[in-house]
Image (cartoon, grey):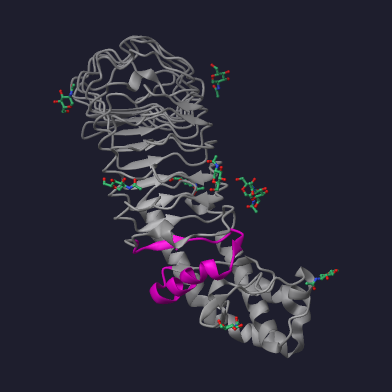
Amino acid sequence: MGVFHPFSAVLLLSCSVLCDHSALAELPKEFPCEALSINVDKNRLKFLSERAFGTLPSLRSLSLDHNNISFITPGAFKGLPNLVDLKMAHNEYISYLHTRTFAGLKKLARLDMSDCNLFNIPDRIFVEQMALREVLCFQNKFRRIPGAFRDMVNLTHIYLEKNKIEAVAYNSLLGLGNLRYLNLEENRINVIHYRAFQDLLRLENCYLNDNLLTDLPRDCFQGLTRLKTLNLGGNLLTNVSKTWFSDLVELEVLYLDRNRLLAIEEGSFENLTSLITLHLNSNNLTALPFPVFQPVYFLGRLYLFKNPWECGCSLEWLKEWMESYKLVRNIPCASPSSVAGLDLGEVVFGRANGSCVDPPELNATAAWLAPSTTEDRFHSLLSRLLQLELRDETGNGTEYLRNGSLPEAALSAGARGQAVGSRRPHVYPLVTWLLLGFGGRLEFGFGVFGT
Ligand SMILES: *[C@@H]1O[C@H](CO)[C@@H](O)[C@H](O)[C@H]1NC(C)=O
Ligand SMILES: *[C@@H]1O[C@H](CO)[C@@H](O)[C@H](O)[C@H]1NC(C)=O
Ligand SMILES: *[C@@H]1O[C@H](CO)[C@@H](O)[C@H](O)[C@H]1NC(C)=O
Ligand SMILES: *[C@@H]1O[C@H](CO)[C@@H](O)[C@H](O)[C@H]1NC(C)=O
Ligand SMILES: *[C@@H]1O[C@H](CO)[C@@H](O)[C@H](O)[C@H]1NC(C)=O
Ligand SMILES: *[C@@H]1O[C@H](CO)[C@@H](O)[C@H](O)[C@H]1NC(C)=O
Ligand SMILES: *[C@@H]1O[C@H](CO)[C@@H](O)[C@H](O)[C@H]1NC(C)=O
Ligand SMILES: *[C@@H]1O[C@H](CO)[C@@H](O)[C@H](O)[C@H]1NC(C)=O
Ligand SMILES: *[C@@H]1O[C@H](CO)[C@@H](O)[C@H](O)[C@H]1NC(C)=O
């Protein structure tokens, strides 16, 4: 034990042992038997032998993050009967765990194996860990949801983001009646089997964003009446079916951004009576029929930017809605060409005999390059400025929501929406200035504005 030195970083502080950052290649031979917690992070440990920590009946927390562990002898943690929290994250050579790796850890409630190199774990690895509540296994190489989680009735949190999981099978998540949080974002999930979530009756937060889903089973989320956040952003969905969300009466935040949505079936959001925020931005939507939102319980924020909106009379209701409720902003029109580039809020619908008339379709070039009046030109510039600003704000789609994690993300997104709106007044002087003949400095103007 040449490396271990009593005067190095080893400190005994009210029963906590700190040996982090100490260049240890092996564990100390003995730990004080009254130790409550041991931290051996950021050393050079390679190997854990059987009963590597001796017998420490008081130990509740053990952290081995950022070592170079590649092998854990079965029974390494025997002698730690009261351990609650075990961390072994960031050990990039752990690719294999024996069924008896965690033998003896009957009180283990939280296990962190994130950023290791695991591609599977034995189905029976947690037979003694029935108290396990949180398992963190993000950033590994799992290709499927480990069977080891099945029937872990006390599990509340599963973190499996950034793996290589390809499917959520019908039996992957059986018996997880207490699960509150499931994170599967940034995997390669292309299929979710029918009834795959059927046992997750207490699920509150579900992240399925940034996968390869093209469709969902009809009754995918059936019975998930406690769900509060559902993130389906960053997939390849084309149609929203009205059966998907029919039971989600407590859903507050729904992400459907960054898909390829072309159509939303009428009634799709009908039962979402608790919805606060709906993200539909960055899709291929041209129309949003009013009945999609009927009955209108919806009292939060609606994100619609980065869609090729067709600002004809069929969207007049949305303009009115924008004006009355101020819940929606930034709906840049892609067509008809006479209003392309304008925000829906700026489109003036003509009337003939009391009924709305669609804005005309012009030659695209004519609409852009030869605005007919100063006012048109003003509006066209203004909307282009606003669009540029918006692009700035939102950057890469909803990248800032990529983690998608918490309702806070939604709230801050709301705050951003607010900011876009409240900045409008600052735009006017700049545009006026441009119209006075300094159009050549347009680029400069944008630059200043973006900051
Ligand atoms: C970590 O372990 C691996 C495999 O056991 C080895 O190849 C590598 O050199 C080790 N790295 C350090 C910094 O000790
Ligand atoms: C779940 O946890 C509770 C409290 O931690 C414990 O009493 C119960 O035995 C656990 N369930 C099982 C099946 O072990
Ligand atoms: C999606 O909706 C469109 C329009 O309603 C329909 O033509 C198309 O068949 C639907 N596609 C799928 C995959 O359901
Ligand atoms: C909304 O909930 C009611 C009552 O549970 C149900 O009958 C109806 O089909 C649901 N709507 C949709 C669109 O699923
Ligand atoms: C959806 O939009 C993308 C880019 O905006 C485009 O490349 C793609 O062809 C569109 N897909 C459909 C089905 O319209
Ligand atoms: C208005 O209605 C009258 C009678 O229905 C019709 O003759 C006229 O052409 C209409 N005007 C327009 C602009 O549609
Ligand atoms: C649009 O421009 C093309 C030629 O560029 C011309 O043939 C066509 O008649 C124009 N259409 C309209 C509606 O002005
Ligand atoms: C947008 O995101 C993609 C993937 O995350 C990345 O490769 C690309 O560089 C990003 N583009 C910008 C402009 O940030
Ligand atoms: C995701 O969350 C982590 C920590 O919570 C943070 O470090 C990271 O920057 C986030 N990534 C994005 C894209 O927001």
Task: Judge whether residue 61 can be spotted in this image.
Answer: no
Nearer the observer, 226 or 161: 226
At x 49% / y 47%, what residue is drawn? 402
Q: Is residue 180 above or below residue 366?
A: above
Number of marks in the rendered image: 0
Q: Where is residue 364 in the image (x, y as percent from the top left)?
A: 76, 69
Q: Position of residue 271 (x, y in %)?
A: 31, 51
- Tell me if residue 307 is in the magenta stretch: yes
| Image position of 308 (left or right of 322) | right
At x 64% / y 83%, what residue is drawn? 430
Nearer the observer, 115 or 446: 446
Residue 282, by quadrant, is bottom right
Which quadrant of the rendered structure holds the C terminus?
Answer: bottom right
- Magenta span of residues: 298-327
Nearer the observer, 190 or 372: 372
Q: In this view, does 266 lie above or below 355?
A: above
Residue 108, by quadrant, is top left
Nearer the observer, 66 or 184: 184
At x 32% / y 21%, what residue is drawn? 150
Which quadrant of the rendered structure holds the N terminus?
Answer: top left
Q: Where is residue 390 in the image (x, y as percent from the top left)?
A: 58, 66
Q: In this view, does 115 lie above or below 318?
A: above
Q: Where is residue 244 in the image (x, y as percent from the top left)?
A: 39, 42
- Tell me if residue 235 is in the magenta stretch: no
Residue 372, by quadrant, is bottom right
The quadrant of the picture showing ligand 6 is bottom right
Task: Judge whether residue 361 can be spotted in this image.
Answer: yes
